[in-house]
Amino acid sequence: MPKIVRGPGTYLFPLPVVLVSCGEGERANLITLSWVGTVCSSPPSIGIAIRPERHSHALIRELGEFVVNLPTAEQARQVDYCGRVSGKDADKWAECCFTKAPAAQVRVPLVAECPVNIECRVRQVVPVGSHDLFIGEVVAAHFDEAILDEDGRVDYARLAPFFYTGRDYWRLGEVLAPVGFSRK
Ligand SMILES: Cc1cc2nc3c(=O)[nH]c(=O)nc-3n(C[C@H](O)[C@H](O)[C@H](O)COP(=O)(O)O)c2cc1C
């Protein structure tokens, strides 16, 4: 099958879509991010890449903490909004009817309406180019009981996350096979 060769670009997909809360008190803000990934298991760490010109960039730099809130497909409109409007110009919490809830280990508030909230403390900031990569160690996480199964594991069908392709948002599809199925 013939293939078209393209030059450098960000071609990895699908991408997660998360709502990151940052800052504290009245200054707390929300930013939608897709340049996000798990980067280490021990210590458990998440990397988030943010352009220095974002309002949230200064807030995270200043406090050295952030919270990764996992939204559901039903919250896609608010998530899109938080990725199109700056906290310099609007109170995104109020505009999206999101509630600030206290975190366990950090000063940044959680988004109460998101079913999973992962508290992170910044351990490294790596300037990469257009974006700075903040590597945050996970210090606590909150799970809505409604998305957990009988064994306390996340039921992804109940969580109903969504993803980004660089163009559109997509819902989670069906289970293909359990991990390790190739060796059974
Ligand atoms: C789906 C989506 C993903 C985004 N991912 C990123 C990202 O990974 N890094 C980034 O710097 N901006 C990203 N943005 C843009 C910011 O969310 C946007 O510029 C936001 O308005 C910045 O808010 P702030 O100025 O309040 O920090 C994304 C936007 C959308 C809609």
Image (cartoon, grey):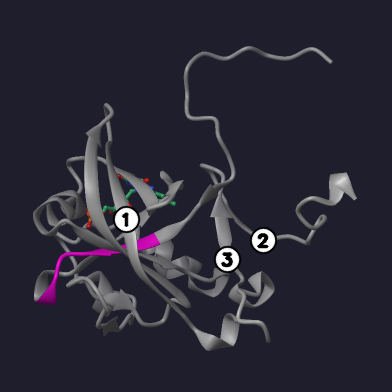
Q: Earlier in the sequence, mark 2 or mark 1?
A: 1
Q: Is residue 72 above or below residue 128?
A: below
Q: Earlier in the sequence, mark 3 or mark 1?
A: 1
Quarter location, residue 162: bottom right
Residue 4 appears at what percent x and percent y? 68, 14
Q: Earlier in the sequence, mark 2 or mark 3?
A: 3
Q: Is residue 134 left or right of residue 1?
A: left
In the image, what residue type sits under mark 1?
Glu
The residue at 84%/51% (across/down) is 181
- The residue tagged 3 is 161
Q: Residue furthest front?
A: 42
Mark 2 vs ligand 1: CB below 8 Å: no
The residue at 36%/46% (across/down) is 47
Q: Quadrant of the N terminus?
A: top right
Q: Residue furthest right?
A: 184
Residue 79 appears at what percent x and percent y? 41, 64
In the image, what residue type sits under mark 3?
Pro
Q: Which is more toward the observer, 38 or 79?
A: 38
Span shown in magenta: 19-25
- The residue tagged 1 is 137
Q: Is residue 143 above or below residue 172?
A: below
Residue 111: which numbered mark, if any? none
Mark 3 vs ligand 1: CB below 8 Å: no
- Residue 23 in the magenta stretch? The answer is yes
Q: Tell me if mark 3 has few (under 14), some (14-19) or many (20+) residues whose alpha carbon lies within 10 angstroms of its own.
A: many
Residue 172: which numbered mark, if any? 2
